[in-house]
Image (cartoon, grey):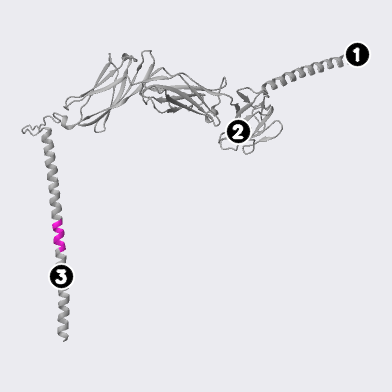
Amino acid sequence: MEILKKRNNSIVNTTKTVFICLCTWYCTSILAAQSTKDKGMLDKSTVEFFQSDNKTNQIPYFDNRFRIDSELEEITLIFYRKKGSVPIILVRPDGSKLRVNSFDSEKVQWFDDRTFDMIKIKKPMPGPWQAIGDILPNSQILVVSDVTIKVEPLPNIVFSGETLKVQGSLFNGEKAIDSPNFKAVVNLDVNFYSTNNSSYDNFGADAIKVTSFRDDGRGLDEYANDSTFTGEFVLDFAAGEWQPVYLVKLPMATRELRQTPIMLLHTPVQVTVEQSTHEEKPHVLQLTIDNKHVDPESLVFQGKVTFPDRQVEPFSIMEGTGVTRQKEIEFTEPGLYRINISAFGKTTDRREFRLVIPEHTFNVKPDEINALVPDLSQSNGDNNVSLSFEQQQAAKEQELLAQEKALEEKQAQAEQNLLIIILGNVVIIILAISIFFGFRFMKKKRAK
């Protein structure tokens, strides 16, 4: 009897344990199902693939599943796949398929590239969908609803020749797009449009495309594939009032961001050169700074001089006060001198800037030089000889005339020799013909 009682108690305890386990499993299942349902619901900006349950937590090649909510009127999907692979196939919740060459053109638009498919669907069928193809592992199905770009505003006042750097980020609705693959889908261009104000130099000017945004770690882009797009450009066009316009070009749509117009002013540094007329005296380069919008004390200059013989000499102007700077340039010889200068400084509101000043050239003509060559002393102790530039020119002219005369004499002698050769050949031919006919005449005479 005691044994039977212990058996009954054991069965009861076991039943309680099983019941508790079943309750726990049921609650866990409900929570997991609810979690899966919530996870499967379509986010307005992105949809992730359902994760597999294997140990590596990788997306199975055959299980690229996602869910579309019933409230969406239109959806644009982007699937990233292996380079050069064929377009994907979409399987609807009812099992029907959408292919790149088989779909209802009134409800579906399909753009296929070497690395992605972009598909726009009107009133998509609610429920679980599946994508079949060489989709990249750990990829996201990006739902393009409202792709925009956010860019920091440019300074209100900039200068001609200035180099600017702008950074932008892509957003899909309110959520930033952090997929490195997305840069292969869009083109981001920076354009400037004239406001057509007749008071400025750019009145009636055409729109100018200055650059495209990049995320490749080159130029002024700091990090590659960090979803921060960088544009770098030089303001080397007409001064005036311009409106920056940023274009986001997708295969099926174009968005644009228009910013407040900015004022492009002329270069705040003017270049002049006081030319020397004597080789012992250098030329003087003078830089005049317009201090209305820049701080003259903050400016430093880096440049180079290209001399008439193509030799290049770099220089810098690091110190100076006031609105002028000067630099001596060596007088080497007559000809064209080229001066290229870059300026670095701050505006009156303490904004750092850098700009390239337009190239300045000046030409030193030989007839403007007072004395190209000073005293030339012979090393053998003879009398010093001083030749003026005019004397040198006259000597050169005489040498050229002598060379021309010698050439003419050589040509005349060559013609005379040729004539003698021709006449000699003619005489020899005549003698040969005379001897030939003379022998024949003598031969006939003997025969008779």
Sequence-first disc among 3 and 1? 1
Mark 1 touches mark 2? (CB < 8 Å): no
Residue under the image location 16 percent in, 29 percent down:
368
Cα–Cα span, label 1 and label 2: 75 Å
Image location (x, y in percent) of residue 226: 51, 24
Disc 1: which residue: 5
Give left or right: position of 185 versus 267. right
Disc 3: which residue: 430
Q: Is 327 situated above or below 367?
A: above
Amino acid type of the residue that numbered disc 1 sits on in the rendered structure: Lys
Secondary structure mostly taken by the magenta-highlighted segment of the chain: helix
* Residue at disc 1, secondary structure: helix
Dot 2 alpha-carbon crowd within 10 angstroms: few under 14, some 14 to 19, many 20 or more: some
Residue under the image location 13 percent in, 55 percent down:
413
Q: Viewer-proximal residue, 407 or 94?
A: 94
**Image quadrant in which you'd find residue 137:** top right
Image location (x, y in percent) of residue 277: 17, 27
